[in-house]
Image: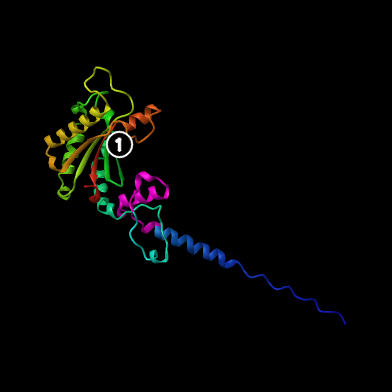
Amino acid sequence: MAKKEKKEPQKPSTAWQGTYGDMITLMLCFFVAMYDPTESDAVQMAALSASISNNNTGGGLSLSKGRLSDLGNVVSSLSSMEKGKSLGPTMKKAVSIFAPDVKSNKITITSDERGLVISLASDAFFEEGSAELNIDETRETLLRLSQFFNEPDMREKRFRVEGHTDNTPVPEGGEFRSNWELSATRAANVLHYLADYGSDENQFSIAGYADTRPKFGNETAEGRAYNRRVDIIILDVGHF
């Protein structure tokens, strides 16, 4: 009598994978459509981005306690976003108000652990080696800055004007003995104009750092141009 051949078990159907993939794609599209970038806290996003990229310039603070903290989940590399939280709306407003100046490369707007940083490009505001403002070229920007600092929600904030240079020595026999005096005088002159346009001097402090805090290397002309700047910082509460 012939033996019956054993039937091979049928392989399970994979048709469900197509349906599952379609569902995941639809959910992704749904959440992308629901996402509103205007509701994001710009300061928090900048700090988070700096943390993920291991960029120490954007951090320095610690995360608020989360639900898993008791289990020993320590994320020491992430920056805190708690202190900068209140500056999120301020950054959004600044980006909107200074859009023409950002477009013309007169200013840049960033944030770090100190607060919101509005950087004035020295080459647009000053002649080389001079602390006198090119007021005809920059009057509108300075007016916008002063009006911005006079907004009602700025009444309780503090600002610091910082002058920075590249590492090029000042000319011998010139007006300034070194980049220290040049950077400090530039910061002071910016504050004088802001005060003339209505800003409250009592909310400000000034500092000159010469070439000790570069943003980029001084090896290239482009790097030196970025380093020549005046930073106006809307200070976070912890840096008053």
Q: Is residue 184 visible?
A: yes
Looking at the picture, does residue 18 appear above or below residue 134?
A: below
What amino acid does circle 1 point to?
Lys
Residue 26: image location, x then y, percent: 45, 61
Q: Is residue 200 visible?
A: no
Q: How many marks?
A: 1
Q: Main secondary structure of the magenta part?
A: helix
Q: Which residue sits furthest front?
A: 177
Q: Which residues are magenta?
A: 32-61
Q: What residue is shown at x 40% (from left), y 65% (from top)?
A: 68
Q: Is residue 45 magenta?
A: yes
Q: Relative to residue 15, is residue 179 drawn left or right?
A: left
The residue closer to the viewer here, 164 or 38, is 164
Looking at the picture, does residue 117 appear above or below residue 132?
A: below
Q: Relative to residue 208, is residue 221 drawn left or right?
A: right
Q: What residue is shown at x 34% (from left), y 62% (from top)?
A: 65
Residue 108: image location, x then y, percent: 30, 38
Residue 89: image location, x then y, percent: 25, 51
The residue closer to the viewer here, 30 or 180, is 180
Secondary structure found at label 1: helix
Looking at the picture, does residue 15 appear above or below residue 138?
A: below
Q: Which residue sits furthest right?
A: 1
Looking at the picture, does residue 138 appear above or below residue 98?
A: above
**Residue 193 figure quarter:** top left
Residue 205: image location, x then y, percent: 18, 40
Q: What residue is shown at x 30% (from left), y 50% (from top)?
A: 43
Q: Which residue is mark 1?
A: 103
